[in-house]
Each structure stands twice: as structure tokens, then as C-alpha cells.
Image (cartoon, helix red, strand yellow):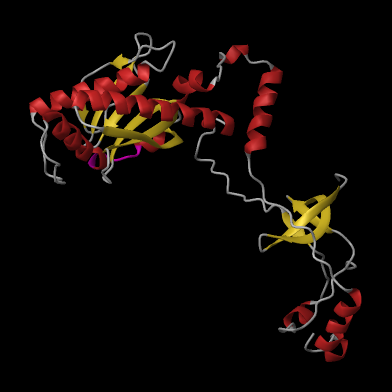
Amino acid sequence: MSSAPDNNISRIKLQNILAAIGSEPAEDTTLIESTEYDWHRPRHFNSRELEKLDDFTREIAAMLSKKLTNLLQNSLEATAASTTQHYADEFLSQTSEEKKNDYNLVFGTDQNPLCGVVGISLQTAIFIVTQLLGDSEPEKDSDRVLSELEESLLLDIIHAIVETLSSSYDNYDFHATGSIVKGQPCLELQGTEELCTIIFNIKKTGSENNSEVKLLMFCDTLDPIVGKTTQAAGEFSAEDISKAIVDRLQEAHVTITARLGSAVLTFEEVMSLQPCDILLLDKEIDEPVELIVQDQALFRGQPAKSAGSYAVVITELCEMK
């Protein structure tokens, strides 16, 4: 340290030490990306089920392209843009001002009148009815209002969307359970329901301008699509509950810290540290690095590099304390 220069290792000595030791490049290992776990998002579907859901949305988009092309007598393309899981309170928190120009239609079955909502923005509504009436490409106009005829035509299109969805289910017969509503629909939700929002982009073939159709559905309504089975609360065994907890924990992300070593200094020594000082750690150069999870050393390994980043090759497991 700067206050005790006689104890420092000079750069020349350090270079000599490194030259005597020698170094060989460690084998590259795969760099694992990590993301922060979002507790505000439900995990109703796991990664495997989400892949099946993506396949389903692509099938719906292909069917929707054909149906809209036939109805509007114009070549249209529908593509699945995104699928997100969220709680109902996120939907309820959207202000009426944000949704005042949107057109929404609630759909369900005879047994369950509320399975989901088809949402269409005013811009998309204008695009659709313009294509249906055979007019030229509409200009964007936030003050534009649909006539009663145009709203009636829009309702026919939304019914066609619901029919397309229904035809993809074996055990559901979806149909509109109310009239088309301008603005956010009045839904009796507690805020904790798990919802899934699927967004489809619609455009004329060859055009770069996309219009959005939003499909909001309860996650459990989509369970048959991904092969997910549900049980009544009283039917869950202790083994089922334990497995469900373990499955959720396995999807959670944790932070792993690589600890090269440590040193104990006095406060005075810490305050005297300067750039180019050498801090000697409590481990030999051939000792393994510890991987720490929640203050517990779980693994040991050797330093390495991968994709231009520091890495650790795990060599052994640590005994749990």
C-alpha cells in the first residue's frame, strides 16, 4: 500500500512472477445470460407451454389472413406479434382516456359468458372498414368517427375473428356475449386473475403499415391449447402442491457471485490504497474460485473466459453448511 511502499510488489517483480508461473488459455465455456425475475408477472404458462402457445397464435394468424382476405376482397396478411401474461389489475389500471377510442367486444361460451375480449383501436377500425367499403388508403385522423354503418361492418369483422378463434378449439364454442363497446368494457374482475394478451398485426400484402388487433383472454381458457390440465382446489394432493412449488422455484432466477478470494485490512490500510497497489488475497493462485448463492458457497471452479467475458468452469460441489 502507499503508506508502506516497502511491502508493495513492484511492477517488474510482478511481471517476473507471472513469467515464472506462465499461463495457458482456459477452455471457453458458454456464457449464461440471466434476467431479473419479475414478481409482478404471472407464470401460468412455463417456457414449453409458451412455445405451444406461439404455434397456436401463428395458426390463428394464418386462418385470420384467409378469412379477412375473403371478407374484405383484398389481400391481407395477419401475423402474431406478441403474447404476454399479466394480471387483471394491469388491464384495469388503464385509464378510460387511453381506451376511449378503442372498440371492444366481449366473447364467451354458454357456460362462461366471459372468456375474453377482442380489442380494436380506432386506427385499425378505420383501416378495416375502409378496406371493406373498397375506399382508398385512409389517412390517420384522431378525430375520425365511425358511422353506424361502419360500426355495423366492424362488428361483422370482429364476429369473424371470434369465429376463427372458436374453430381452433375442440371443446369451446365462442360467440359474442354483448354488443360492441367503444371504450374500455365494464368487466367484473378482482385484479388477480391471470390474463394473456395476444396481439396480431394486420396489413395489406406488400404494405409496410401495420394495424393491430388485440385478443385478451383468461389464461385458463388457453390451457387446452397447450395441454395444461386443471384441478379443483380439493383435488390437489400434497405431492401435487410440492411439485407445483418446485416447478415455480426452478423457473426463478438467482444471482451467483464468483469469489476469487478475500483479504483482511485495517481501516487505515484501506484508506491508504492507491491505483497500482497490489492487494494479496488469502488464496494461492492454484486454488479454486468459489461460487456464492445467498451467502452460501455452492460450487468451486477455475477462472476462465468466454465470449470476451470472465467465466468460471465448475469443477466441484461444496458441502452445504
Q: Is residue 205 above or below residue 225?
A: below
Q: For this view, does 168 lie left or right of residue 186?
A: right
Q: Which residues are magenta?
A: 93-97
Residue 260 or 134: which is nearer the viewer?
Answer: 134
Q: Quadrant of the C terminus?
A: top right
Q: Position of residue 295 (x, y in %)?
A: 76, 52
Position of residue 232 relative to residue 200, above or below, is above
Residue shown at 60% from the left, 12% from the top: 234
Q: Is residue 261 above or below residue 290?
A: below
The image quadrant that residue 86 belongs to is top left
Is 13 inside the magenta-drawn segment? no
Q: Is residue 188 visible in the rendered structure shown here?
A: no
Q: Residue at x 56, y 17 (%)?
A: 229
Q: Position of residue 3 (x, y in %)?
A: 79, 89
State the residue at coordinates (55%, 20%): 228
How many numbered marks are there?
0
Which quarter shows the N terminus?
bottom right
Q: Is residue 114 left or right of residue 18?
A: left
- Magenta stretch: dominant SS? loop
- The answer to whether residue 240 of the structure is visible from this angle is yes
Q: Is residue 128 positioned above or below 176 on the image?
A: below
Q: Residue 220: image x %, image y %?
A: 48, 21
Q: Nearer the viewer, residue 192 or 297?
A: 297
Query: Residue 73: x percent and y percent?
Result: 19, 27
| Camera-side residue of 76 and 119 | 76
